[in-house]
Amino acid sequence: MSKALDRIRIHTGDITKLDVDAIVNAANTSLLGGGGVDGAIHRAAGRELEFECRMLNGCKVGDAKITKGYKLPARHIIHTVGPVWQGGGRSEAELLASCYRRSLELAAANDCRTVAFPAISTGVYHYPKDEAAEIAVGTVTMVMEEKTVPEAVIFCCFDEHMAELYWQAVAALRKG
C-alpha cells in the first residue's frame, strides 16, 4: 500500500493552473459547464471545450468521459459526474468510488502519467467532505496498487481544510 501512497500528492490551489497530463472535472450530467470547479474549468479551457462536450451526449453519474484540455496547461480533461448526497443510502459511496476508478481508467488508456482530481461531489452536491476524502484516497490507492499509470495523482484542494482531510485519509491508510 505504501508504494501507491508514495505516488499521491496533495495540493492546495487552482486545478486549472496545474501542468499535468489530465485534470478531472467534477461535472454535471450535461457536461456543458456549471458552477464551482466545473465552471472554472470550462472558462479556463475556452469555448472549444463546450463544443467537444456537446458531442459526448452527457455522462452518467459514476462514469467519466475525456476531452482535450484546450487552453489549459493540462493535455486532457476527464469529466466525471459525482453523486448528489442524499443521506448515504442511495449508493452514493459506490458511485463516488466509481468516479475515481473510471477517471483513472481513462487516464491510463490515454497515457496520462499525471492526473489531478478536485474533491468530487463536496461542493454543491454536499457530499460530506471527510467521507469523500476517504473514498477518494482509498479508491485511488487501490487502483494505483494494480497499475503503473498514472505515475502520480494529485488531489487538488480548494482550501487548507480540505487538504487536511486528504492528509488525514492518507495517514489513516499508512497506519493500516
Image (tube, helix red, strand yellow):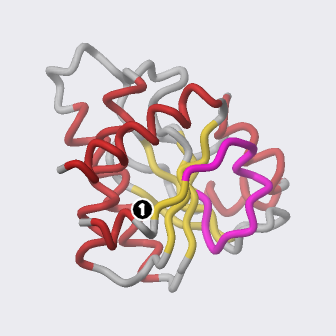
Residue 138 image point, x, y percent: 27, 50
- Out of 20 and 47, give the one closest to the viewer: 20
Residue 164 image point, x, y percent: 51, 33
Which secondary structure, mark 1? helix
The image quadrant of residue 114 is: bottom right
Q: Residue at x 24, y 31 (%)?
A: 92
Magenta residues, as a range?
Answer: 10-23
Q: Is residue 86 above or below residue 123?
A: above
Q: Is residue 90 above or below residue 46?
A: above
Specify few, some or many for label 1: CA neighbours under 10 Å numbering under 14, 14-19, or 20 or more: many
Q: Residue at x 55, y 66 (%)?
A: 115
Horizontal arrangement in the rendering, residue 38 relative to residue 149 (left or right): right
Residue 99 image point, x, y percent: 36, 50
- 3 inside magenta stretch: no
Q: Residue at x 23, y 77 (%)?
A: 146
Furthest toward the front, the residue is: 175
Horizontal arrangement in the rendering, residue 110 relative to residue 49 (left or right): left
Name the residue tied to disc 1: 103
The image quadrant of residue 85 is: top left
Residue 94 image point, x, y percent: 20, 42
- Out of 119 and 27, give the one closest to the viewer: 119
Number of numbered callouts drawn: 1
Q: Is residue 128 above or below residue 40?
A: above
